[in-house]
Image (spheres, rainbow, N blue to C red):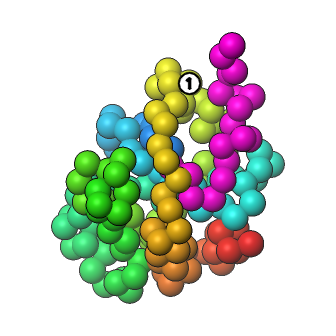
């Protein structure tokens, strides 16, 4: 028996879970890895994600003036679902409603399973967002509880 994604979503909304989808707000048609950072994700609030990209050097050049801990690089050795070094720009977390997440996944036609990112990487991502002078305090509160 298949369960529709919109009914199963609450079971997989957990801080540190990784989602793989195309976000139309990003100028790319390729799917990206999104790590959920919301401490207590619910359907009533927007979910806070950081997005990963393989363009590590490009992001480093673009964000060079920001604190170094706001750029988190994860390797395939740390997280086997990544095929190359992946950088997360913690200066620009994305806020996505549960309804939009369901729409993104439904558009993709499937939810590509990813493992939880793990405590080490999750800790660096949270620290990166909290260290960013560009992130609003309300977003920082959403990820730290």
Q: Position of residue 124 (x, y in %)?
A: 47, 75
Residue at 47% in and 72% down: 120
Q: How crowded is mark 1: few (under 14 residues within 10 Å), some or many (20 or more)?
A: some
Q: From this viewpoint, which residue is outermost toward the right?
A: 44
How far from the left and from the top, in percent, is residue 57?
19, 67
Query: Would you place residue 122 above or below residue 2 in this image?
Result: below
Q: What stretch is highlighted in magenta?
A: 1-18
Q: Kindly identify the residue that appears in the image at 48 percent across and 58 percent down.
A: 117
Q: In this view, does 25 lie above or below 123?
A: above
Please identify the quadrant where the N terminus is shown: top right
> x%, y% of residue 41?
72, 54
Residue furthest to the top: 1
Q: Which of 2 and 100 is in front in this view?
A: 2
Q: Quadrant of residue 144?
A: bottom right
Q: Is residue 78 left or right of residue 8?
A: left
User: Closer to the camera, 72 or 26?
Assistant: 72
Residue 103 location in percent, x, y?
59, 30
């Amino acid at each position: 028996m298949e369960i529709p994604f919109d009914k199963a979503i609450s079971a997989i909304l957990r801080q540190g879970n990784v989602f793989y989808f195309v976000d139309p707000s990003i100028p790319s048609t390729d799917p990206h890895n999104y790590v959920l950072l919301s401490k207590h994700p619910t359907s009533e609030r927007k979910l806070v994600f950081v997005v990963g990209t393989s363009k590590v050097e490009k992001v480093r050049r673009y964000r060079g003036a920001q604190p170094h801990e706001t750029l988190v690089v994860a390797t395939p050795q740390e997280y086997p679902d990544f095929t190359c070094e992946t950088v997360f720009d913690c200066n620009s977390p994305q806020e996505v409603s549960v309804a939009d997440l369901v729409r993104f996944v439904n558009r993709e036609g499937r939810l590509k399973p990813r493992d939880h990112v793990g405590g080490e990487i999750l800790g660096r991502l949270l620290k990166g967002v909290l260290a960013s002078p560009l992130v609003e305090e309300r977003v920082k509160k959403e990820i730290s509880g």
